[in-house]
Image (cartoon, rainbow, N blue to C red):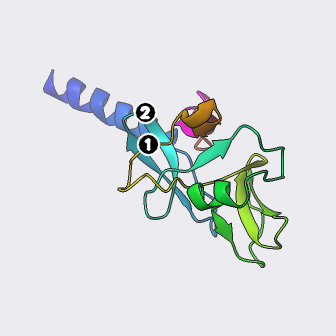
């Protein structure tokens, strides 16, 4: 009985591990468990957000907006990888995007895993990492 239980547990752990999202090399993002579930973060564990007033591949957050919601900066030589892309902002700087949605941090998040920007103004949302159910390690994002 113990052997059967141990085998079942091991298979469950392998199944869970196989559905984790793989972040392409060179993309400065990660995932973290939060009170809202597993979300996309920067490499320091700070939650990333999307702005519903953006257009695909185009940021509409500048000036005071960008002071409160700093873009996830990308270097000029950063390259697209998978669903992550680099967009050019109006001011000539570059920003990371996921599936065309520009990515931002929130100045009021103080510690890794904070999600205080969720729902602000009904236009700012975390990017929740979900299981594709395919058994692959590609993962999916929902928001």
* Mark pair 1, 2: CA separation: 8 Å
- Asked whether 69 or 77 is in front, the reply is 69
Expressed as whole percent of the image width and height from the top left, the position of residue 1 reads: 15, 20
Q: Are marks 1 and 2 in contact (CB under 8 Å)?
A: yes
Residue 129 belongs to the span the image colors magenta? yes
User: Image check: 94 left or right of 2?
Assistant: right
Point out residue 4 in the picture as x, y percentages from the top left corner: 23, 24
Residue 43 vertical placement versus 47 (above, below): below
Residue at the spot 39% in from the left edge and 42% down from the top edge? 33
The span shown in magenta is 127-133
Task: Tell me which label, 1 or 2, sits earlier in the chain.
Answer: 2
Q: Is residue 138 left or right of residue 30?
A: right
Q: Is residue 67 above or below residue 143?
A: below
Residue at 77 percent across and 69 percent down: it is 79
Q: Secondary structure at mark 2?
A: loop
Q: Nearer the viewer, residue 69 or 74?
A: 69
The residue where tag 2 is placed is: 36
Question: Mark 1 — residue?
Answer: 115
Nearest to the eye among marks 1 and 2: give it: 1
Q: Nearer the viewer, residue 113 or 53?
A: 53
Q: Residue placed farthest to the top in the image?
A: 1
Whole-percent x and y of residue 90?
85, 65
Above-or-below relation of 61 to 136:
below
Q: Which is more toward the observer, 79 or 125?
A: 125
The answer to whether one can see residue 17 in this image is yes
Q: Is residue 142 magenta?
A: no
Report whether 127 appears left or right of 110.
Answer: right
Among all residues in the image, which is located at the extreme front?
64
Determine the secondary structure under disc 1: loop
Task: Tell me the crowding category of disc 1: few under 14, some 14 to 19, or many 20 or more residues within 10 angstroms, Cα based.
Answer: many
How many neighbours does mark 2 have within 10 angstroms: few (below 14), some (14-19), or many (20 or more)? Answer: few
């Amino acid at each position: 009985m113990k052997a059967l239980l141990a085998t079942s547990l091991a298979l469950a752990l392998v199944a869970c591990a196989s559905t984790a999202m793989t972040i392409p090399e060179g993309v400065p993002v990660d995932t973290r468990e939060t009170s809202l579930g597993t979300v996309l973060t920067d490499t320091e564990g700070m939650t990333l957000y999307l702005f519903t007033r953006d257009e695909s591949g185009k940021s509409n957050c500048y000036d005071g907006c960008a002071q409160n919601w700093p873009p996830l900066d990308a270097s000029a030589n950063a390259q697209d990888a998978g669903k992550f892309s680099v967009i050019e902002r109006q001011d000539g700087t570059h920003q990371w995007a996921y599936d065309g949605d520009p990515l931002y941090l929130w100045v009021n998040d103080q510690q890794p895993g904070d999600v205080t920007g969720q729902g602000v103004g009904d236009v700012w949302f975390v990017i929740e990492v979900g299981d594709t159910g395919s058994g692959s390690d590609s993962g999916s994002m929902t928001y």
